[in-house]
Amino acid sequence: MTTNSHPAPAIADQLVLVTGASRGLGAEIARAFLRQGASVIVNYLNNAEAAARLADGAPDRAMAVQADVCDPAALEALAAKAQARFGRPISTVVNNALPSFSFNGDARPHADTLSWEHLHQQFEGIVRGALNTTQAALPGMRALGFGRIINIGTNLVQNPVVPYHDYTAAKAALLAFTRTLSQDLGPDGITVNMLSGGLLRTTDASAATPEAVFDYIAANTPLRRVTTPREFAEAVLFFASPWSRAVTGQNLVVDGGLVKN
């Protein structure tokens, strides 16, 4: 067991894995880290072209790697590729990958049509995915005596204004997992935190959201606007930065003040 006595490295000195980074919020998070000088693994499942395009924007510091977060062996191979390419292990993981999902309140499963299969699909991608990435990166983080695990949540856990049962239950489980991991990994110099967003304007997942919902959210938010993916992505940087070195097990809600956590 190590103690967290080493100075936390700057973001520019970190090797960051962002899951589901070929598009949407994941791509914005990858770009935010690249703007700060970090080296970034752009993980994707299907969209090789978009992932390669993003990585090609910083060829010395970015690498696109296909891996299904539900497959532990694929993530172990990803970690090995990353270390071989950059000469150091992954130090920072952003668990952003999302199973296929559309924020369309009219099409969601209701209480009488919700199935365990709906729930299982979300738990597989969200909770199992975070478990697999954590375990793939853990040996390298322990060797460094430093690690940052950053999970992406939702403010629907605090304020289920639209009852997306499957998605919200999985994110709530991820919040609990964030807290238990922080307790377990803190002695190794590894922090585990969550950022929870609301509706973002706009990602692939929110593309089906009616304009009236965006207007409603904006009208009820102190900042009177809907948070953008870039704004959310830049808040992720805090938990990777040296400024958060004494913060772990926390959930930061980034939604313009709609939900007070």
Image (cartoon, rainbow, N blue to C red):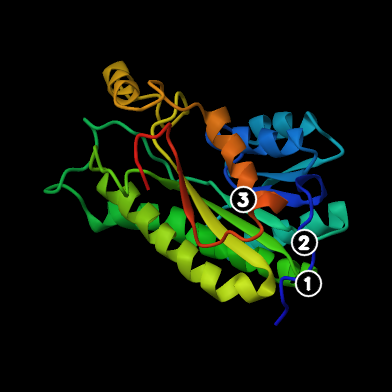
How far is the residue under mark 1 from the one under mark 3? 20 Å
Q: Find residue 237 and report its horizontal and vertical position in percent.
A: 64, 43
Query: Vertically, is 238 above or below 189?
Result: above
- Which residue shows up at 61% across the image and 50% down it? 239
Nearer to us: label 1 or label 3: 3
How far is the residue under mark 2 from the one under mark 3? 24 Å
Nearer the observer, 190 or 243: 243
Left or right: 7 with respect to 67?
right
Q: Which residue is mark 1?
A: 143
Q: Find residue 258 and report its horizontal and vertical position in percent.
A: 35, 34
Q: Which residue is mark 2?
A: 80
Label 1: few (<14), some (14–19) or many (≥20) C-alpha neighbours in 10 Å:
few
Counting residues from the start of the chain, the first of labels 1 and 3 encountered is 1
Q: Which residue is mark 3?
A: 239
Q: Amino acid at mark 3?
A: Phe
Query: Vertically, is 216 above or below 88?
Result: above
Nearer to us: label 2 or label 3: 3
Nearer the observer, 115 or 163: 163
